[in-house]
Amino acid sequence: MYLLGYDIGSSFIKASIIDIETGKLVAAASAPSAEMPMIAHKPGWAEQEPAMWWENAKDATRQLAQKANLKDVKAIGISYQMHGLVAVDKNYEVLRPSIIWCDSRAVEIGDTAFAQLGKENALTHLFNSPGNFTASKLRWVQQNEPQIYERIHKFMLPGDYLALCLTGEATTTASGLSEGILWDFQNERPADLLLDLYGISPSLIPTIVPTFAPQGYVTSKIADELGFTVGIPVSYRAGDQPNNAFSLNVLEPGEVAATAGTSGVVYGITDLKEYDSASRVNSFLHVNHTLQLPRYGTLLCINGTGILNSWLRKNTASGLTYDQINQLAASVPVGSDGLVTLPFGNGAERVLENKLVGASVQNLNFNNHTQAHLLRSAQEGIVFALNYGVDVMKTLGVEPRIVRAGDANMFLSPLFGEAFSTITGAVVELYNTDGAQGAARAAGVGAGIYKSYREACQSLKTTRIIEPNVALKDAYEQAYLQWLKALERMLH
């Protein structure tokens, strides 16, 4: 018997099947074969077609069907890129491309709302500035595309849309609403104060369902098309970073997870109602939050992470594999001989108070610096940006002493792992899991197949442990100080 998990990224749709009894991975697939495109009609914009996610999810499912009998799938879980906006009409037809997580068009709308609500009032109830999150993106549609807005029956997050495709039902979760800055943390309900300010009717919010529970059932049409048994439950749904934390069994106060894919994230759990006064890091309901046992996730996100590495590979290192890039980068000493890269080229960065500053390379010397220097400087720049945000998290009581991450993406680079561990001072534990596997295990909890979170995560295995390189600590700290000076010059 199996559990199935989907992970809707902005580059790929991944799907994994887990054996219920052993908890081990049975099969995995992803689609498409090359990264999904983003639509960017203007600088700072980023959109994707929801239908593309669904078609690629079906493609990945068909790949799994060649490796396992999908009739044996007993529950489905969904992980998804956070903060996106999908708008559908009364027939559940998509009205426009999704405005996704790294789109910056609503920054001014959110900043204005923050001022209108009053900083203390907004932070007390929302824990965050409305920024360029889902609520503000919907307000942008209302202001700039009124004919489309008038036809909206429900708005949802990317994972809500995939659940709709599978079950025919429009639903969402409290955790998901908190990701869109649509949740009132004091009153434990949708955020009327922001909805009222934006003139958005609460009726546009889909039915709220628990994070872990049957949230809908696969329709006969989809079951026939993809090979499922009719009526299996979709029993879990969460944004990719809360789900990544669950995947790594990061559920209790003091525990910290990280990921370094297209964007880079450090995500720490607390039971305290804490928030950053400048919303440089953000607080959401964690997947296991309850009124009796509150659990909040403090999230640092750096938009320009793996996407920078990918851009360099496409534009400056064509023909090289990522392994070859990592080897080249490692051939250069710590600090890249003075070359500094600021990786902020993927939309407005929350840790910079939603400034849209762009990426830059500084101190380039045509006589000294090579391709290898550029590649190392990029990886160091990503690590330093993450550490810059970790320093903000520490002011909220989140101290990353041990950081758990999947053994994937940028953490596959020995240089990246060493730099991250050394500059943050954290021991990094890498595990044999990913978002799709985590969503599958969580579906088992939601369907009542697993009786506890611990049981769902019992098959997790550590693949590697990275400890700070004491011998290089001073060199990394000097390089980080130089990076900070470059950032200050850019910001001022």
Image (spheres, rainbow, N blue to C red):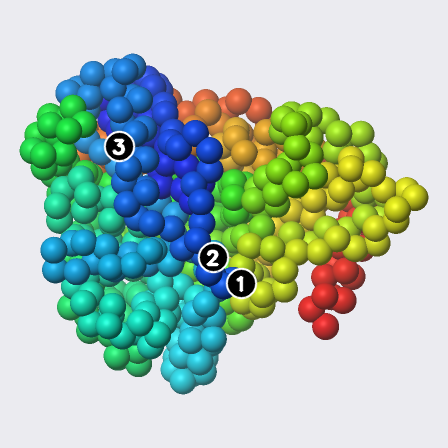
* Any part of residue 387 in sight: no
As shown in the figure, which amino acid type bears the numbered disc 3?
Answer: Lys
Q: Is residue 139 left or right of residue 335?
A: left
C-alpha span from label 3 to label 1: 31 Å
The answer to whether the residues at label 1 and label 2 have Cβ atoms under 8 Å apart is: yes
Q: Residue 54, located in which quarter of the rendered image?
A: top left
Disc 1, SS: loop
Q: Few, some or many C-alpha atoms within 10 Å of disc 1 (few <14, some 14-19, many ≥20)?
A: few
> Dot 3 corresponds to which residue?
58
Q: Mark 3, mark 1: which one is toward the viewer? A: 1
In depth, the one of 223 and 238 nearer the eye is: 223
Residue 439 screen position, x and y as percent = 31, 35
C-alpha span from label 3 to label 2: 25 Å
As shown in the figure, which amino acid type bears the numbered disc 1?
Answer: Pro
> Dot 2 corresponds to which residue?
40
Residue 426 screen position, x and y as percent = 62, 41
Q: Is residue 280 left or right of residue 476?
A: left
> Dot 1 corresponds to which residue?
43
